[in-house]
Amino acid sequence: MTDGQKPKILKVSALCQLCHARKAVMKRPKNSQKLCKECFYNVFETEIHNTITNAHLFAPGDKVAIGASGGKDSTVLASILKTLNERYNYGLELVLLSIDEGIKGYRDDSLATVKRNQVQYKMPLEIISYKDLYDWTMDEIVSCAGIRSSCTYCGVLRRQALDRGAAKLGINHVVTGHNADDMAETVLMNLLRGDVARLEKSCTILTQSSGSPIKRSKPFKYTYQKEIVLYAHYKKLDYFSTECTYAPEAFRGTARELLKSLEAVRPSCIMDIIYSGEHLVLAPKKKKVTTQYKNKKKIMEHQDDQSQEVEINADGSVVLKAKKKEELKDGNTCEKCGYLSSNKICKACMLLAGLEMNRPKVNIDNNVAVDGAAKLTKTLEQLSF
Amino acid sequence: MAIKIKVEFLGGLDIISSSVREHKCSVPLEEGEATMKDLIEYVTKNIITDPKDIPVFIEDDTVRPGILVLINDTDWELEGMEDYVLESGDVFTFTSTLHGG
């Protein structure tokens, strides 16, 4: 015990369970193992390396964009990928890709962090802004459409912005910092919503819409949030931590709290939920065929052949026979913007078209409500008389 | 004899203490007797600016799940959690893990 710092006598139970030499500083939520700093770094990095190699995420020479928000997850992701790329010779070319949603008092500050990371990790940085891409900032969208649906808009627009950013850089693989807690949260949410179609897909580490050139992967799929925060803390990584100024998705927030309470009782439950999610496979839908149904179908088919009429709604729009096989297929492109879409018009264009109708015709000078609407609301909230 | 300690709020948790991240405190309790439980009570009464924010920090009389607690940079789960006995010079770090990444 010649530690020098504190001449304290350590109990054997306080030692690291791997090296049995240094004092344990953390307890792994995954398996309750007590580890010292050095062993924790080692285990943490090796596990992520194993996740990457087991899933064959990368090939030598790949150009990979790291979706970087400046928050803890993406900052640790950038740091880890740089470390592993050098240690195990992945042969990757890493680029930071950030999205500027245009949220005053939130995104401008977090982008400053990403810019520092760019220097710290010596990686190129590309920033794609909603304003350039869609001619709307989130602040403008919220002042137009209200704060309630902010996450819906932001989520749809960000997904497309990341893809477009990657395409611009000639990159076909985007990695994101989604961690085990996020995955478990999503499984839980889909379960609670009865969204079985999403439930089955929610745990895949590598996703790609058919026809899309951009792959997405989550190297932190099995990494606990607690360990990410500890890693960032011990390594003194420079990250940004402020909640988005707009209201978080209420349902996700509740699912998160539920998960955190469950984790406090049984820390392995996050891993267990992911395991369940991975192994849930939907039973193929059985078609119930009754004689009555068969007869009906025959009559229907007969009618279908004869009537090629198009149904027209009261507002003049045409009813689309949605379940025809040619439509609703992955790999189509949006008629408006040319982006990949399963429908005629992609979701982003649909949302934007709705917004465009409500855009204020005249812009009032010094309209603070548009610029930094959230910041203003926050300031007003804090005022007391 | 008061116990001189340091309390830190990281990971965005400083919103509960008017954006002040570091607090040097003299806890007016007897060293050797006062525990983490007493410190949590001290923090809620003396450091949290707005009583409305107490539920951000406390749930069921202990630190809310999702807030990482370190005592001298060691996970408090290894230090006996609420039963840890305070010592002068200790550093207590509370980090929110709930913020987006």
Image (tube, coloured by chain):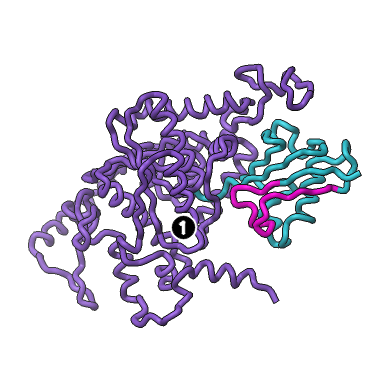
Magenta stretch: give its range: B8-27
Q: Nearer the viewer, residue A189 or B91?
A: B91
Asked which quadrant contains residue A318, the reply is bottom left
Q: Is residue A160 left or right of residue B13?
A: left
Q: Nearer the viewer, residue A253 or A115?
A: A115
Asked which quadrant contains residue A328, the reply is bottom left
Mark 1 element type: helix
Which quadrant, please, contains the N terminus of chain A?
A: top right
Dot 1 falls on which chain? A
Compared with A76, A115 (above or below) is below
**Residue at screen point 67% across, 35% down:** B73
**Residue at screen point 39% across, 29% down:** A85
The amino acid pointed to by label 1 is Arg
Residue A152 image point, x, y percent: 41, 60
Compared with A357, B35 (above or below) is above
B13 in magenta = yes
**Residue at screen point 47% across, 66% down:** A148
Compared with A195, B91 (above or below) is above
Residue A353 image point, x, y percent: 29, 69
Q: Which residue is mark 1?
A: A107
* Picture mark count: 1
Using a 10 Å C-alpha cutoff, classify the residue at mark 1 as few (fewer than 14 neighbours), some (14 to 19) or many (20 or more): many
Evaluate whether residue A276 shows in this view.
no
Q: Any idea which chain is the cyan one in this picture?
A: B
Which quadrant, please, contains the C terminus of chain A?
A: bottom right
**Residue at screen point 52% across, 25% down:** A43
Residue A345 image point, x, y percent: 24, 61
Evaluate whether residue A2 shows in this view.
yes
- Residue at the extreme left of the image, as rendered: A306
Q: Any idea which chain is the purple one in this picture?
A: A
